Image: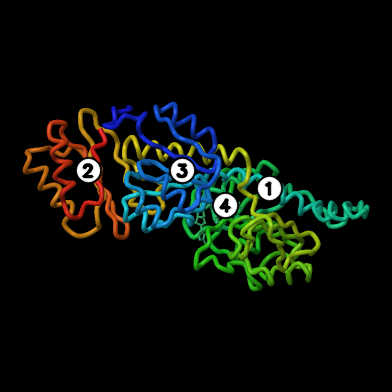
Amino acid sequence: MQKQVSFPREKFKILLLEGVHPACVEKLQQAGYQPELLKNALSEDELVKRIPGVHLLGIRSKTRVSKKVLEAADSLLAIGCFCIGTDQVDLSAAALHGVPVFNAPFSNTRSVAELTLAEMVMLARRAAHKSQLLHRGVWEKSADGCVEVRNKTVGLVGYGHIGPQVGLLAEAFGMKVYYYDILGKLPFGNATQVASLKELLALSDFVSLHVPETAETRNLIGAPEIAQMKQGAFLLNLSRGKVVDLPAVKSGVESGKLGGVAVDVFPEEPASNDEVFSCPLSGLDNVILTPHIGGSTLEAQRNIGLEVGTTLLKFTEVGSTTGAVNFPQVELPLVRESHRILNIHRNVPGVLSSINTIIAQMGGNIQAQYLNTLGDVGYLIIDVDQTISAAVKSKIDELPTSIRTRLLF
Ligand code: NAI
């Protein structure tokens, strides 16, 4: 059900920077919007000049949205980051300005899973190592230490979005899949959850890490954990650099305890392609190093365009903030024959009661309502009778706690 929103879509100003994927532009155009697309990032000063009047801003990782930019943004309703990271945006300042920030954390899940599987095969066959030798003119045709992945066990640490995809692809190769997660997770395919990391490490020919970086996952795999792994087991980290203690992994490779390692993410990563890179594993045999490209595919870029485009549209058309990284998450199904008011407010006691008093005093009926808070900000969606919606909106707007109030439809 598409409601007739209270603003003309063609006059709604959407500014997309850094060559956001055409799939997103197409999606917005199909919904009746006319986004403006710039190929490059803008500097802070350029953005301060461009941002007044803009309702939606789309960026990738190079555009910084600072407090100064947000202060100049007189009409901004939401920011879409067409990438995974959101540290280029001052998230708390955005929340205090009533601006939710969206990103696309799961658009590259499959890309990571495919690279993980490919690297398992490369490690098992010592193929990356042999390729490096051959580039240097060394012909090392030998089956020594080379195995199939079929009938081997893979232990997945972290079974969120990526873990299960790796598991399903591994099963297609004939591998037996175990996983360990701090949460109870339903298995996909024939995978089996185990109760502890220790148990998983002891079972696995391949250990593949798919956890976020948290205080608990820092150095999750160090010398004691490597000691618990099978002799000659393989370790893959395509999650976050600080999850693994690289000097301990180096010792594991040098002693032969680890048969091979693949690492895509590092505790310290170069800020640009111009910097020279080295790490404790550089130059070791049967170690595959890749420059954080697990999720970098054309398909993932397109998925990111569509995912962020969809969340921005859902926010603009129905007020949903599901997936926002800095904002209370609120989603309310559409009710026919009602008007929808969105209120962003300072999170202090009594706001809901003041708003409901306003509606009651006008003799209005609340058809649906959903409030959620996060930190200093509260977000409320209310569906009310059409006859009183405009008056209710004005009164709510006047409350000293209100940051922004909109009558959506
Ligand atoms: P997710 O958030 O969907 O899943 C993570 C899982 O790890 C959750 O099920 C969680 O319960 C579990 N977990 C958290 N702490 C744990 C612990 N101490 N022990 C065991 N399990 C624990 O994340 P998703 O999307 O599957 O991504 C996994 C990792 O991959 C993340 O670190 C993400 O940043 C990284 N990533 C890397 C990319 C690359 O280019 N190499 C691209 C995309 C994601």
- Mark 2 packing: few (<14 Cα in 10 Å), some, or many (20+)? some
Q: How far from the left and from the top, in percent, is residue 396? A: 16, 46
Disc 3 marks a residue whose amino acid type is Gly
Disc 4 marks a residue whose amino acid type is Thr
Q: Quadrant of the N terminus?
A: top left
Name the mark on residue 58: 3
* Up/down of 148 relative to 409, above or below: below
Q: How far from the left and from the top, in percent, is residue 273? A: 67, 55
Q: Nearer the viewer, mark 2 or mark 4?
A: 2
Q: Nearer the viewer, mark 3 or mark 2?
A: 3
14 sits left or right of 281 in the view: left
- Mark 4 packing: few (<14 Cα in 10 Å), some, or many (20+)? some
Q: CA distance from mark 1 to mark 2?
A: 46 Å
Question: Sequence order check: which comes first, mark 1 or mark 2?
Answer: 1
Find disc 1 in the rendering and name its residue: 117
Find disc 4 in the rendering and name its residue: 192
Question: Sequence order check: which comes first, mark 3 or mark 4?
Answer: 3
Q: Are marks 1 and 4 in contact (CB under 8 Å)?
A: no
73 sits left or right of 22 in the view: left
Q: Are marks 3 and 4 in contact (CB under 8 Å)?
A: no
Q: CA distance from mark 2 to mark 4?
A: 41 Å
Q: Nearer the viewer, mark 1 or mark 2?
A: 2
Question: Sequence order check: which comes first, mark 1 or mark 4?
Answer: 1
Disc 2 marks a residue whose amino acid type is Gln
Name the mark on residue 369: 2
383 sits left or right of 174 in the view: left
